[in-house]
Amino acid sequence: MRVRALRSTVSWRAAAPLSVLAVLLAGCSATANEPETPPSVSAGPVTLANCGAPLTVPAPPARAVTMNQPATEIMLALGLQDRMIGTAYLDDTILPQYAAAYAEVPVLAKEYPSKEKLLEAEPDFVYASFASAFTDEGAGDRQSWEKLGVRTYNSPAGCAKETRPAKLSTEDVFAEIRDIAAIFGVRDRAEALIADQQARIAAAAATVADATATTVLWWDGGSDAPSVGACCGAPGMIMQAVGVTNAFADLSGSWADSSWETVADRNPDAIVLIDAGWDPAAAKRAFLQRNPTLKDLPAVRGNRFIAIPFSSTAAGVRNVLGIEALARGLSALPAKAGS
């Protein structure tokens, strides 16, 4: 019988210890309203580290909620839509290959659902890409959910600075996919997905001639002080996978503020323009082409721009699309002046 006491935490907690909740949430036999565990799912406890703390999931979750697009699409890429009872917060249209599966999952909120809204959904697992999901502005802190017997997972790339990867790599993204697959007992699906993405990344990188001789500015946003792709986050990871030189690899963090004078001094060979609904690549291009400090840079004058969607820049299954877009864009650029 499905546990419904999350709607009344005080009365429920007086009636059942947390250990019982874990058993009920994870171990009750399925009813007509809950899916049977598919034959490909391996049941059993999984213990791993997440954001510097141990996480034990006693059995594959049956009522998962995802917050943030990367988490949602990792779940869908692993074929786990039948284990999802809610999702929230897209930055972009869902990838076409996952659209039908996504349509089966209730959308709890356009952005983050409140803790009360999430409680109503009665999840046994909450998976987010960004730490902001587990704040007062989101669904509340992870410790509170743990006390209710609800396990949580935050993408390692979105953990606090001291516990996230020092320099994000594609292997870190694959490790997250493996974590989620292990939690849900579908490790074979993760390995198939990762093998496909590794092959695509290698093929994309192979198309770029003289990659290391190409210096790239990754411009995320900001007109007064440009926010640029720095050494150690998704922008750096994508540039490294293609093999190009990051114009701002000396700056720490995932993104960092610089200045247009510094951009001009570094004189990149190509400029990545992040394309977002709230800050489109076309507007960025127009800004560069009229800015007196920048308009005569060879990359600007030569129209050596590459647009990459914002949704490809958060750790997840879309990173391969960002890598492919960068490689494809570099291969299609007009020749550098004087070459």
Image (cartoon, helix red, strand yellow):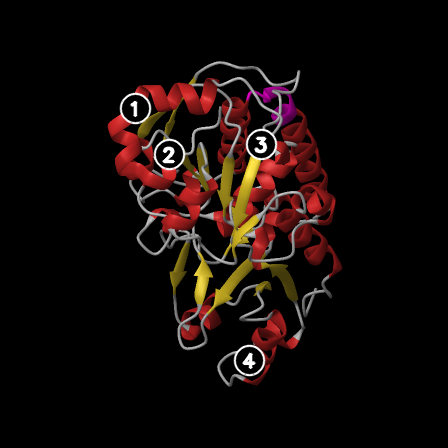
Query: Which marked residue is nearer to the observer: mark 1 or mark 4?
Result: 1
Label 1 and label 4: CA atoms lie apart by 61 Å
Give the label, 4 or 2, closer to the camera: 2
Q: Mark on residue 287?
A: 4
- Looking at the image, is 229 positioned above or below residue 41? below
Which residue is identified by label 3?
83
Tell me where residue 86 sits by quadrant: top right
- Camera-side mark, 4 or 3: 3
- What's under tag 1, amino acid-wise? Ala
On the question of residue 296 being in view, the answer is no
Q: Earlier in the sequence, mark 3 or mark 1?
A: 1
Range drawn in magenta: 185-191
Mark 2–mark 3 Cα distance, whole angstroms, equals: 20 Å
Secondary structure at badge 3 equals helix
In screen coordinates, is 126 left or right of 79?
left
Circle 4 packing at 10 Å, graded few (<14), some (14-19), many (20+), is some
- Label 4 is placed on what type of residue? Phe
